[in-house]
Image (cartoon, rainbow, N blue to C red):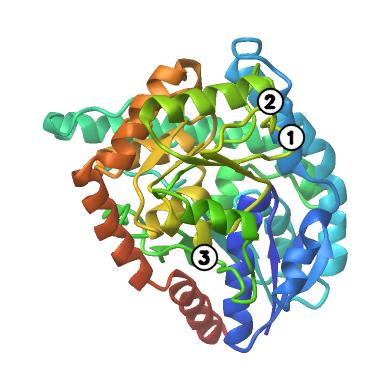
């Protein structure tokens, strides 16, 4: 069968779906990935067909937050700005997708790919599979992704009622936030306007969730069509070779701490670099720092800090002592699979959720919201992550379990089983 994958966002929103595409191709399906121009090489290098959606909403979202210093915009204003930018591109992406999927027998859709793909599936009367990297279905077992405090387990039934209510509030807000992009996509195909919530309620195909059940178990109160499969990893090619200078640095001392949380509102590259270097020095650790798009200065760096522009996480993380990052789903997954303690510095979206899960499982220190980040707070967290034996043992044990899982294989089996039955 011909399956089209529509994925919208940044590289972290695209790479797991390329992994699913490879799995589908290995299962005998023809696969086309629809995404943004910067990811054409990533898709084609894995032997998959590519079609351009145009635009790059992931970059738009990132730049929207980077333009504003802390406190300059409220979260409601930030979300409103992001959705306006996404809505502005929705019609073009929908029209491009409609043309590119003329021969598709089924669609597989990322979190924001649903906004484009569901109208196309409705129009063509073909199955569409939602595939998420975060929990978006309500449950009594934990609160939603938004900045919602979790009640202590000792509260029992009260905590479960609280979680259900929080999910209802978040679901309503998310549906309202998505109303304009959904309307724009459906109008592009001359379909009647329908709410995002209603679209999801009538989805009968399996809904896939791409994280490890060993890290976050599937809620017992989820509907039967929801399936947590395991992570969707896209491993680095065996032909990839690290820079000689990086190998020399790794061999010159103790395993370093990886630090890669990109840019922060209100911090210049020099200030970002000073914060990271000071934190590592206070913690007594060497470091490898990710410099994304000039977010870190290379000037006056000490010899125990190495800067890289990009590096495959699956190669680097097992060679480090701990990982420090925003807490996005993909980077969190890579750190957990490597069996390394994690320090999360959350800012938006699902980052606080994963940071709290890491802390609750004893896999890292308490997450540090960016407004509370300082050389002192980061140094304490790095020191604990790099040296705490209990934390390291917990991370090692979970990493071993994750490495035994086959999230891609489980997801492909679910999709293939449904398509066979649908015939």
Q: What element carries label 1?
A: loop
| Residue shown at the point (47%, 80%) measured from the top left | 413
Q: In which quarter of the image is residue 119?
A: bottom right
Going from N to C along the chain, the mark reached first, 2 or 1, is 2
Q: Is mark 2 on a helix, strand or loop?
A: helix
Quadrant in which the N terminus appears: bottom right
Q: Give the x, y percent position of residue 407.
A: 44, 69
Q: Give the x, y percent position of residue 408.
A: 49, 72
Q: Distance between the residues labelled 2 and 1?
A: 7 Å
Q: Tags 3 and 2 in contact by the CB under 8 Å rule?
A: no
Position of 219 with respect to 237 (left or right) is left
Q: Residue furthest left?
A: 154
Residue annotated with mark 1:
294
Q: Tags 2 and 1 in contact by the CB under 8 Å rule?
A: yes
Q: What element carries label 3?
A: loop
Going from N to C along the chain, the mark reached first, 3 or 2, is 3
Q: Give the x, y percent position of residue 365.
A: 31, 34
Decide: few, some or many residues near mark 3? Use Cα within 10 Å; few <14, some 14-19, many ≥20.
Answer: many
Residue annotated with mark 2:
269
| Residue shown at the point (35%, 36%) measured from the top left | 356
């Amino acid at each position: 069968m011909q399956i089209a994958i529509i994925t919208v966002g940044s590289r972290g929103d695209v790479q797991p779906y390329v992994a699913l595409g490879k799995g589908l191709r290995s299962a005998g399906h023809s696969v086309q990935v629809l995404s943004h121009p910067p990811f054409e090489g990533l898709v084609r290098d894995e032997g998959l067909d590519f079609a351009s959606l145009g635009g790059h909403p992931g970059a738009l979202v990132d730049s929207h937050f980077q333009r504003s210093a802390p406190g300059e915009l409220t979260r409601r204003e930030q979300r409103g700005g992001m959705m306006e930018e996404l809505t502005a591109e929705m019609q073009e992406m929908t029209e491009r997708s409609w043309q590119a999927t003329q021969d598709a027998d089924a669609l597989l859709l990322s979190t924001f790919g649903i906004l484009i793909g569901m109208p196309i599936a409705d129009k063509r009367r073909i199955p569409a599979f939602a595939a998420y990297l975060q929990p978006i279905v309500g449950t009594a077992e934990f609160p939603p992704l938004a900045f919602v405090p979790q009640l202590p387990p000792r509260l029992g039934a009260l905590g479960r009622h609280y979680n259900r209510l929080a999910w209802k509030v978040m679901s309503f807000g998310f549906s309202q936030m998505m109303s304009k992009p959904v309307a724009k996509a459906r109008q592009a195909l001359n379909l009647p306007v329908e709410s995002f919530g209603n679209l999801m309620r009538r989805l009968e195909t399996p809904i896939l969730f791409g994280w490890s059940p060993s890290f976050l178990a599937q809620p017992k109160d989820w509907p039967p069509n929801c399936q947590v499969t395991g992570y969707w990893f896209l491993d680095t090619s065996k032909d990839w070779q690290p820079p000689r200078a990086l190998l020399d640095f790794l061999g010159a001392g103790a395993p370093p701490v990886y630090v890669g949380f990109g840019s922060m509102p209100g911090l210049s590259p020099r200030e970002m670099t000073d914060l990271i270097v000071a934190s590592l020095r206070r913690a007594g650790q060497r470091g490898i720092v990710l410099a994304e798009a000039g977010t870190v200065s290379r000037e006056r760096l000490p010899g125990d800090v190495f800067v890289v522009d990009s590096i495959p996480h699956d190669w680097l993380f097992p060679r480090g002592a701990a990982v420090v990052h925003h807490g996005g789903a993909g980077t969190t997954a890579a750190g957990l699979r490597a069996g390394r303690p994690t320090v999360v510095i959350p800012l938006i979206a699902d980052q606080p959720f994963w940071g709290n899960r890491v802390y609750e499982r004893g896999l890292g220190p308490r997450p540090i919201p960016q407004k509370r980040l300082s050389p002192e707070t980061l140094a304490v967290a790095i020191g604990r992550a790099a040296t705490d034996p209990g934390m390291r043992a917990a991370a090692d044990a979970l990493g071993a379990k994750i490495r035994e899982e086959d999230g891609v294989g489980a997801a492909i089996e679910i999709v293939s089983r449904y398509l066979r039955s649908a015939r």
